Image (cartoon, helix red, strand yellow):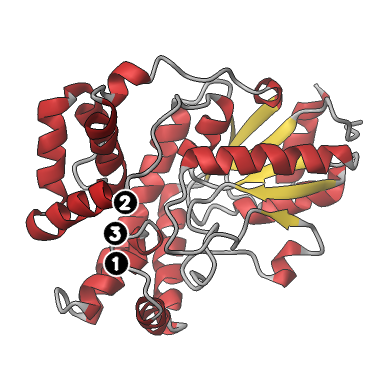
């Protein structure tokens, strides 16, 4: 029977948004003596609550959770920052004889932990502001065209509207004179724990998943999402930050700027999240060693499937 130790596998539970990752991660933690480490790139922020699916105290069921709501929404927080913080959290959990259970849907965070990035220059605030001004005036697609001229390989990997990563790729070029494509092979060595991460990916029926996504998005707006965004903006959080770049938050910002009506913001948010769920599944299909679990994390017997796999 699986028992926790410092050399046991580190469990990683992922899958598309609304697939029941939290419920499965908590159930496993209760079964194996574990603690949860979040790897959702929106749940890390404080004050960003309604549309993030942060687990409530009831959903946590007494299980300790780490790396949730601890980053100021105006902060430039990167995947490398998360990997550093996650490594520290895992070490602390295992020092207590507990099992670390990574739970989230941001595949890039998990990959960065398993395959660390190259050393990159610190953010130059003035340079970043110049690129953000270009984004505001000409749109993210213009930045992507700039990147395509300077680093075609990176532009091919990145979506034209992925302004955060496109801007970072441009910053590296302007600060170092070298492209991210040149620097990517110069990765730092993987930490010892990388080989112990055992990834499980939920794959629910698509129609049921999309129905849940649509219903949850409607609930977020009904719960006061627009007011939450107003408060964040009033507190100085900018529309072009990572925090307010998340799906529904982005559309609410467009609504508040007068670029779309409320009904359009709701419907576009539903579409954005459905598209994101598809991209998550595509991402994890490229992850080596992933073990796929048919259904939702809330399905009966799902934790048994994971534990049976660990015992084999």
299 left or right, relative to 219? right
The residue sitting at 72% across, 70% down in the picture is 57
The residue sitting at 11% across, 36% down in the picture is 146
Residue 134: x, y in percent?
Answer: 13, 53
The residue sitting at 67% across, 29% down in the picture is 198
Name the image quarter holding residue 192: top right
Residue 246: x, y in percent?
Answer: 37, 59
Residue 299: x, y in percent?
Answer: 66, 52
Q: Tell me if I can see residue 300 in this picture.
A: no
Local SS, label 3: helix
In contact (CB < 8 Å): disc 3 and disc 1: no
- Pick whichever of labels 2 and 1 is earlier in the sequence: 2
Residue under numbered circle 1: 239
Determine the CA span between mark 3 and mark 1.
Answer: 20 Å
Which dot, 3 or 1, sits closer to the camera? 1
In contact (CB < 8 Å): disc 2 and disc 3: no
Local SS, label 2: helix
291 left or right, relative to 6? left
The C terminus - image quarter: top right
Q: Which of 22 and 238 is in front in this view?
A: 238
Which dot, 2 or 1, sits closer to the camera? 2
Which numbered marker is on residue 271?
A: 3
Q: Tell me if I can see residue 100 in this picture.
A: yes
Name the image quarter holding residue 159: top left
Determine the CA span between mark 2 and mark 1.
Answer: 16 Å
- Pick whichever of labels 3 and 1 is earlier in the sequence: 1
Name the image quarter holding residue 231: bottom left
Residue under numbered circle 2: 125
- Pick whichever of labels 2 and 3 is earlier in the sequence: 2
**Badge 1 local density, few (<14 within 10 Å), some, or many (20+)?**
some
Determine the CA span between mark 2 and mark 3.
Answer: 33 Å
């Amino acid at each position: 029977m699986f028992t926790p130790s410092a050399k046991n596998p580190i469990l990683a539970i992922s899958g598309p948004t609304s697939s029941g990752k939290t419920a499965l991660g908590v159930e496993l933690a209760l079964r194996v003596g574990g603690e949860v480490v979040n790897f959702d790139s929106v749940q890390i922020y404080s004050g960003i609550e309604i549309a993030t699916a942060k687990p409530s105290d009831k959903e946590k069921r007494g299980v300790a959770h780490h790396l949730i709501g601890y980053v100021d929404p105006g902060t430039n927080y990167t995947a490398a920052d998360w990997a550093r913080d996650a490594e520290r959290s895992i070490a602390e959990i295992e020092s207590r004889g507990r099992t670390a259970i990574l739970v989230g849907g941001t595949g890039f965070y998990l990959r960065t932990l398993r395959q660390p990035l190259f050393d990159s220059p610190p953010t130059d605030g003035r340079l970043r502001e110049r690129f953000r001004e270009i984004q505001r005036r000409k749109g993210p697609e213009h930045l992507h065209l700039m990147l395509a001229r300077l680093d075609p390989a990176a532009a091919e990997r990145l979506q034209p509207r992925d302004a955060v990563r496109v801007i970072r790729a441009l910053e590296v070029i302007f600060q170092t004179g070298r492209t991210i494509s040149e620097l990517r092979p110069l990765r730092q060595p993987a930490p010892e724990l990388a080989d112990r991460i055992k990834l499980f990916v939920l794959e629910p029926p698509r129609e049921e998943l999309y129905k849940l996504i649509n219903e949850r998005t409607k609930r977020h707006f009904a719960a006061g999402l627009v007011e939450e965004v107003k408060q964040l903006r009033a507190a100085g959080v900018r529309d072009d930050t990572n925090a307010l770049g998340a799906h529904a938050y982005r559309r609410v910002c467009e609504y508040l700027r007068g670029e779309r009506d409320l009904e359009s913001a709701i419907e576009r948010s539903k579409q954005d999240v459905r598209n994101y769920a598809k991209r998550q599944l595509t991402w994890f299909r490229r992850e080596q060693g992933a073990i796929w679990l048919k259904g939702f994390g809330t399905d009966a017997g799902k934790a048994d499937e994971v534990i049976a796999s660990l015992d084999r």
